Amino acid sequence: MATGKISKRTVDSLPIGPKENYLWDTDLKGFGVKITASGSISYIIQYRMGGREAKTRRFTIGSHGSPWTPTTARLEAERLLVIVAQGIDPVDAEKQRRREAVDLAFSNYADLFTRSCKREGWRRLVERSIRLYLKPTFGMKALPAITKIDVVSVLCPSSEHLAQLAA
């Protein structure tokens, strides 16, 4: 378990070993770099939720390279460690965010709405309209992210309606 200042120079000069290696930052406790046997480099944080008795957890910030440099990864690590200090687990928060992105996807709600149509002719009309006009535009976009301008651009593609909404 090596320690040192994580900088661009130290990250670029890290040796590739037969197994995973870690370099932990001396300035920011819990911030580190993971080097795999294949040579990929990732920035990580290590933390415990609930004190010394709790299990150690690791969260991957991102792979080395654009946009993650040692400086940007350190800033993100500081932000995440503040969240941990507030009692929020970043791993659980990320899982929840991904689950909500799928649960709140327009496509899922459009399918649910289509199934709620009782009459067969009406259901087919709604399903066709959604498939042809709405799903290509909104697809897996989350419902809260769909704005009034988005809806108007699908229903009234002329630019004068969009200009009125934007003003």
Image (cartoon, rainbow, N blue to C red):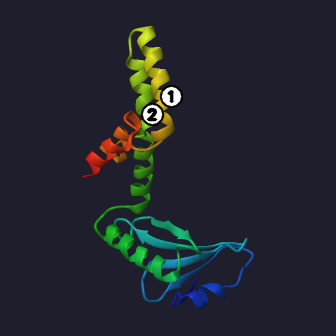
Residues 99 and 57: in front is: 99
CB atoms of marks 1 and 2 within 8 Å? yes
Q: Which residue is mark 1?
A: 131
Q: Secondary structure at mark 1?
A: helix
Where residue 9 sits, quadrant-wise, is bottom right
Q: Position of residue 66 (x, y in %)?
A: 56, 73
Residue 151 appearing in the image? yes
Residues 20 and 12: in front is: 12
Q: Amino acid at mark 2?
A: Leu
Q: Amino acid at mark 1?
A: Arg
Figure check: 115 above or below 10: above
Tell me: 156 left or right of 70: left
Residue 147 appearing in the image? no
The structure residue drawn at horizontal position 38% and vertical position 77%, both measured from the top left corner, is: 78
For the residues marked 1 and 2, what is the alpha-carbon distance in whole angstroms? 6 Å
Residues 150 and 59: in front is: 150
